[in-house]
Image (cartoon, grey):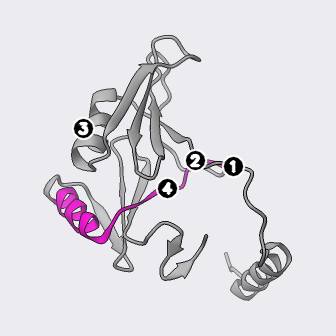
Amino acid sequence: MSIDYQAIEAKRERIKAEHLRENRPPSSARGLHHFALISSDVETTIRFYQDLLEFPLTEIFENRDYQGSNHFFFDIGNGNLLAFFDFPGLDLGPYREVLGGLHHVAVSVDPSTWERLRGKLAAAGVPHQVESGTSIYFTDPDGARVELLADPLGEMYGSRVL
């Protein structure tokens, strides 16, 4: 399959010129309340996110939409939460990256924390990939892709994105 990269670049530039506003209005949103993923095992997820990645567990209660299911939350800083559901009795199968689905969750950490967590991932035997000296990509116990990014919030690879 041949990909026309020049056409893709031209389309990107057209979209940017048409939709990116220099004086954009404020967002109608207050912020990300939580981003929810699915967990096949609550304790494994807690050990991974709280013990390995150092995201404190903040709450766990029954999911109002599915009896017996847990809804639990981790603090990822700046008033943001990463949440999980488990769904006992539903055979959801393994994680799959699909169109319209999750590609990855990127969490900003300061550079010294980035270095420490990179070491913890290596010591725990978690396969990971470092990109551009500021991103670490790996998968959680259920296969969801996670990125730890040493860039500040609102920046990406030296560019302001917010």
The residue that label 2 is drawn on is 32
Residue at the spot 33% in from the left edge and 35% down from the top edge: 57
Q: Which residues are magenta?
A: 100-122
Residue 106 lies within the magenta run: yes
Amino acid type indicated by mark 4: His
* Residue 47: numbered disc: 3
Amino acid type indicated by mark 3: Arg
Residue 127 lies within the magenta run: no
Amino acid type indicated by mark 2: Leu
The mark lying in front, picked from 4 and 1, is 1
Please tell me which residue lies in front, 30 or 57: 30
Marks 1 and 3 in Cβ contact (< 8 Å)? no
Image height check: is 111 above or below 71?
below
Question: Alpha-carbon distance for marks 1 and 2?
Answer: 8 Å
How many marks on residues? 4
Q: Going by the image, does 59 lie left or right of 9?
A: left
